[in-house]
Image: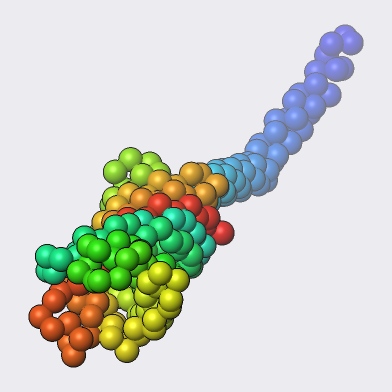
């Protein structure tokens, strides 16, 4: 009897529950699907953002590496000074010149075209000339002759790096005579008017640079032009020859 009385109630409860389930399914399923689609879009955007961030970091690392690799290439300024062992070559058979020791000092500008090739411009005060015994010069006077020929030289050296730090250099040199004096037995004679103001030469040598800018240089210059003025030379050709050892420093 009790079951018969509860049967209508249970039937009505079942119908209500079933109706509620279908109502919820119809109403909330689109909402759930919509939220699921939003979640997928958010995850996709997040993935793109992460990939973009990683790519930008990788590009910054590449840029830094390129800058660090090319930091040694550019323009460098420096100073140098050293020792000259100067002499002359001449067509005069009566002349037997010896070496005059002098100094060189100047400024250096180096431009690295690539990691292997570069150009180096210098402005150098250079003490040149020669010494000789007077008897060997065909003079009646006895004693020694010292010819002091000082120049402001502008060499332009083209360099090729053989190994790291070591560069082969070669190039032309333009010189301007600033002093020409001959000393014979203690008596000084100015011969600036008898010498050419401008001289030309060609040089070659080696340069070794340390990591912190200190460099060592060995160079030999062959004179091309005549030291003597054409009105003084009387058919004699005199050319400068200079071997130099220098030490310098690049500031950057």
**In terms of image quadrants, where is residue 176?**
bottom left
Residue at left offset 43%, top offset 78%: 188
The quadrant of the rendering that contains the C terminus is: bottom right
Would residue 132 appear left or right of 19 to someone viewing this image? left
Asked if residue 95 can be seen in this view, the reply is: yes
Q: Is residue 212 above or below residue 175?
A: above
Q: Residue at x 51, y 44 (%)?
A: 211
Q: Position of residue 70 (x, y in %)?
A: 44, 53
Quadrant of residue 240 within the rendered picture: bottom left
Please indicate whether residue 93 sits to the left or right of residue 97 in the image: left
* x then y, percent, for residue 187: 43, 76
Total residue callouts:
0
Along the line of sight, the residue nearer the viewer: 11 or 149: 149
- Expressed as whole percent of the image width and height from the top left, the position of residue 193 reads 32, 89
Q: Is residue 181 left or right of residue 57?
A: left
Residue placed most toward the observer, 59 or 34: 59
- 30 to 182, vertically: above or below: above
Give the image's coloring scheme: rainbow
Q: Can the viewer see residue 126 in this picture?
A: no
Q: Residue at x 29, y 57 (%)?
A: 98
Residue toward you, 81 or 94? 94
Going by the picture, which residue comes out furthest to the right?
2
What is the x, y in percent for residue 21?
70, 33
Using the image, determine if residue 154 lies above or below residue 111.
below
Residue at (45, 71) in percent of width and height: 186
| Quadrant including the N terminus | top right
């Amino acid at each position: 009897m009790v079951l018969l009385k509860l049967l209508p109630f249970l039937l009505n409860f079942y119908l209500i529950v079933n109706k509620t389930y279908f109502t919820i399914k119809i109403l909330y399923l689109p909402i759930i699907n919509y939220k699921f689609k939003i979640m997928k879009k958010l995850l996709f955007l997040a993935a793109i953002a992460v990939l973009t961030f990683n790519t930008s970091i990788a590009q910054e690392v590449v840029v830094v590496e390129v800058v660090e690799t090319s930091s040694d290439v550019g323009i460098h300024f420096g100073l140098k000074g050293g020792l000259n062992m100067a002499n002359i070559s001449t067509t005069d058979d009566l002349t037997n010149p010896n070496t005059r020791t002098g100094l060189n000092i100047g400024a250096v500008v180096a431009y690295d075209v690539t990691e292997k090739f570069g150009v180096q411009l210098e402005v150098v005060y250079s003490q040149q000339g020669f010494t000789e015994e007077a008897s060997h010069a065909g003079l009646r006077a006895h004693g020694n002759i010292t010819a002091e020929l000082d120049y402001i030289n502008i060499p332009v050296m083209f360099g090729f790096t053989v190994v790291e730090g070591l560069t082969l250099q070669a190039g032309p040199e333009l010189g301007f005579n600033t002093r020409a004096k001959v000393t014979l037995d203690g008596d000084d004679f100015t011969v600036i008017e008898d010498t050419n103001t401008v001289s030309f030469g060609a040089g070659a040598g080696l340069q070794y640079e340390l990591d912190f800018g200190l460099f060592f240089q060995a160079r030999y210059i062959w004179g091309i032009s005549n030291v003597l003025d054409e009105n003084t030379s009387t058919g004699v050709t005199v050319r400068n020859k200079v071997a130099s050892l220098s030490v310098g420093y690049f500031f950057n």
